[in-house]
Amino acid sequence: MTKISLKLFAATLALASGPLFAQAIQVQDAWVRTTVQGQKGTGGFMKITAKEGARLVGVSTPVAGVAEVHEMKMEGDVMRMRAVPVLDLPAGATVELKPGGYHLMLQDLKTALPKDTTVPLTLTFEDAKGVRSTLALKVPVAVTAPGAAPGATPAAAHKH
Ligand SMILES: [Cu+2]
């Protein structure tokens, strides 16, 4: 599993576009949660590190009609979720998209996502000068985070 992820990560670098900028952004441990036939939405997770700081301003994938960055937050006793149109990536910090926090929300899914497949995902970043670049990823589909202990059920971990 780990070996496969590393290979996919190497492949993503080759697909980055933008003047050197994309090289300054690292995406690690990306995964998208599996779905069953008929399920309309799922979450995507990853760690993003922008060496010189950037903003994540767009997400797209051919498998979903709508792809957005979401934030989950406790407000009192209630877990609420909202779309985050722009996600700040402070210089040198690793921003983690994970269940229960920031995540990619894929809605209006056009196909089921069985495990051990991959999902093409394009991230659009903007640097401090407003220059945009894209990073094309092939993200593995998994039941739980790569390397995480198995056991958590998808429904329990990502409620909507
Ligand atoms: Cu969500």
Image (cartoon, rainbow, N blue to C red):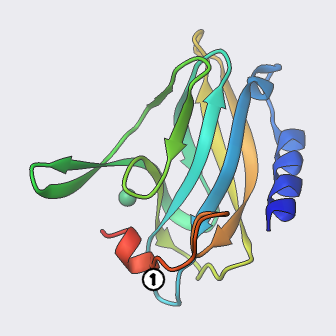
Judge from the rendering whether residue 93 lies leftward or rightward of residue 21; answer left or right. left
Q: Is residue 99 above or below residue 36?
A: above
Identified at 62% across, 78% down, the residue is 113
Percent position of residue 85, x then y: 40, 37
Judge from the rendering whether residue 133 lies leftward or rightward of residue 109; answer left or right. right
Secondary structure under tag 1 reads: loop
Q: Which residue is mark 1?
A: 39
Along the viewing direction, whichever of 152 and 119 lies nearer the viewer: 152
Percent position of residue 137, x then y: 74, 51
Identified at 80% across, 59% down, the residue is 5
Q: Is residue 157 above or below residue 50?
A: below
Identified at 47% across, 88% down, the residue is 38
Percent position of residue 69, x then y: 44, 47
Q: Is residue 36 above or below residue 157?
A: below
**As drawn, which residue projects farthest toward the front?**
149
Identified at 81% across, 19% down, the residue is 19
Q: Is mark 1 within 8 Å of ligand 1?
A: no
Count of residue discs: 1
Q: How many C-alpha atoms fall within 10 Å of the one at disc 1: few (<14), some, or many (≥20)?
A: some
Judge from the rendering whether residue 10 lies leftward or rightward of residue 25; answer left or right. right
Within the displayed image, which quadrant is ligand 1 positioned in?
bottom left
Amino acid type of the residue tagged 1 in the rendering: Gln
Along the viewing direction, whichever of 4 and 67 lies nearer the viewer: 4
Percent position of residue 36, x then y: 52, 87
Along the viewing direction, whichever of 63 and 145 lies nearer the viewer: 145
Instruction: Work out which quarter of the rendered image holds the N terminus and state it.
Output: bottom right
